Amino acid sequence: MIRPRNIFVLIILLSIAFSSCRRQSMQLRSSVRKTQNDVRYFNRDVNKVKNFLGIEEGDNAEDMDSSSQNLFTPIDQKNIFTTYGYVYDAINGSKDVINSSNFYWDSIQKVYYVRNKKYSKIKPENEVFGWHPYWMGSAWESYPFELLSTISYFSYKLDPETGSYTNPQQMIEWRNTAMIDSAKLKKTKVLLTVSSHGYKNNNSFLGDQAKWGVLIDSLSNLLLDRDADGVDINFENLPYLKRGSFNRFIEELRKRLNQKLGTKTPIISLTLPAVDSREIFDIKDLQKSVDLFVIMGYDYNTGPQLQGAVAPLLPFESKNISLNTTLKYYIDVGIDPSKTVLALPYYGSMWEGNIGEGGTTSSMFERKVTYREIMSIFNDEFVTKNNLSPTLEKNSMTNYFNITYPDNTTKEVWFDDDYTLGKKYDFAITNKLKGIGIWALGYDNGYNELWDVIESKFATNAVPVVDPVGQIEGYPIKVSNYILKKKDLLIVSSLFFLFAVVIGFVLALSDWKVRDSIVKNQFHRFIMVMIIFIFLTPIIYLINEVFFLKSTWKYYAVFILGGLTIYLSSLLKIKSTKRP
């Protein structure tokens, strides 16, 4: 039985609690009114800004997208990051890809930038063009597409007799390869190269305009199948008498592709030879239809010539051929540097020879060797054992090395590495070219140093972020955004859950066995007090935070009520009831 004295004490405590709650209710109403006034003042200031910017009130204001609304908040976000950056890092992790230390504020552009290698991409004003030859198979899986502006599938082999293609297997691959999807994910443009080599083949095709229509129709279907961005034209060994026909073909290609692709203007790139037959291309006329010129800055010494660089920067020995003379020629004939790239080799050239009697050496061109193959030569047991290393030829800015084997056979290899390619990239930049090209992608498979040079010369890892708080990729922020969007639903669900728990707890107390267990067992009383703490703590916290009371004594109220609960529970006595 509960004693009368205890009932009296309980009534007094309830009266005190009621009086305290009444005072708190009045304070809450006052705080709400103050908050409403602050909101009105804020809205008034925002409207002033809108009026200043010429943004009218009405339905359109509610339809503004988040990027427009963010125009009003860059300074506020700067202050948020300055003051609460540690909170941001605590939520997302200070070692996360994005954290507060990655952001810097551009006061001129009024925008944040985030720097991280993950966000590396080619600068908008530059171009890095690469060919993916079909024979490289799945090597594309290792391509860093973020460092490629454009990738061109090589190739649609032109049938000069019909205008169709001679390699159906590769066209099936074009229609199905996941390489195109991977490139698009990184916003890399995708082209299809049309290749036609040889004087006779080009003379036959360019001499019959009906074949042009077959080619253009076929290309249009292939581009539409993969939502590709355009074509790359690779015609080598053009007949001089077909110079005008080639110009008309490119003009017709531009006109017909524009009509057939409709929604977007297709890109047309054109490869230009380094030396042979370059005078056949009428650059000034072609510039009217071509978006990008790709100068093939390689194959200078890969035949019966004397040993030498594949892509010499300056002339080597007596022959006056080099990247410098090639580019000078095209600039002199009026090429636009801002739509021109200089393609360079990811391969070298190898000569083999013999040392005869008297020490004389005879050698002949053996084959082209990829950068990957060249690097594997350096790991050859004979090379490493004899501590052989390449030499830099400074005029051509190309590496070479000689190997003499015990049987008096020799090999000589000329090749570019990250250092020499970097110097040739500087040459392109100095001449104000749009960028560089790569023949061919995958030839360096397994080695990243060549990509590191491209990143340092042509890429940026600074990405503009208008709304750094809202554009985070961190998982905790995504969860928080979801909670904020669904807050009404979550609050109602939480209240129903809390209500169910309270009802369940009250129903449990209606059982005399539960009450008897709580009263007679000190540990059980402690558990009951803890449950009350669990209920009271969030309630008081919400009152304090949601209604902006910001008073520290509210937290002590939890402990005061908990202490009263312990005291009252110690006074409760329940008379044992004998049960049959």
Image: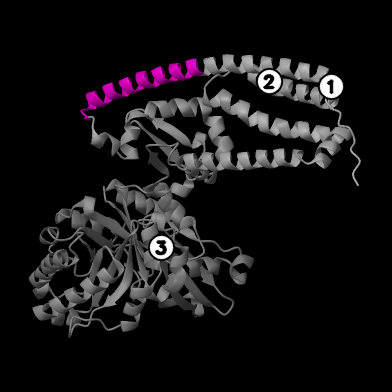
Q: Are marks 2 and 3 in contact (CB under 8 Å)?
A: no
- Tag nearer the camera, 1 or 3: 1
Q: Quadrant of residue 268?
A: bottom left
Q: Amino acid at mark 1?
A: Arg
Judging depth in this view, the residue of 251 and 560 nearest the camera is 560
Percent x, y of residue 425: 35, 52
Quadrant of the image containing the N terminus: top right
| Residue 188 figure quarter | bottom left
Q: Residue visible at 68% across and 14% down? A: 16
CA–CA distance in space, label 2 to label 1: 27 Å
Helix, strand or loop under label 1: loop
Neighbours of disc 1 within 10 Å: few (<14), some (14-19), many (20+): few
Residue 31 makes an appearance in the image: yes
Q: Earlier in the sequence, mark 1 or mark 3?
A: 1
Name the mark on residue 557: 2
Q: Main secondary structure of the magenta part?
A: helix
Q: Is residue 356 above or below residue 492?
A: below
Q: Which is more foreground, mark 2 or mark 3? A: 2
Q: Where are the magenta residues, as a range? A: 29-56
Rendered residue at 85%/38% (across/down)? 517
Answer with the quarter of the image where residue 211 lies. bottom left
Q: Nearer the viewer, residue 513 or 522?
A: 513
Separation of marks 2 and 3 at Cα, in angstroms: 59 Å
Image x and y of residue 448, in percent:
49, 58
Residue denoted by label 1: 3
Find disc 3 in the rendering and name its residue.
182
76 relative position to 97: left or right = left
Q: Give the amino acid at mark 3.
A: Ser
- The answer to whether one can see residue 308 in this image is no
In the image, taking residue 489 as reference, residue 534 lies left or right, namely right
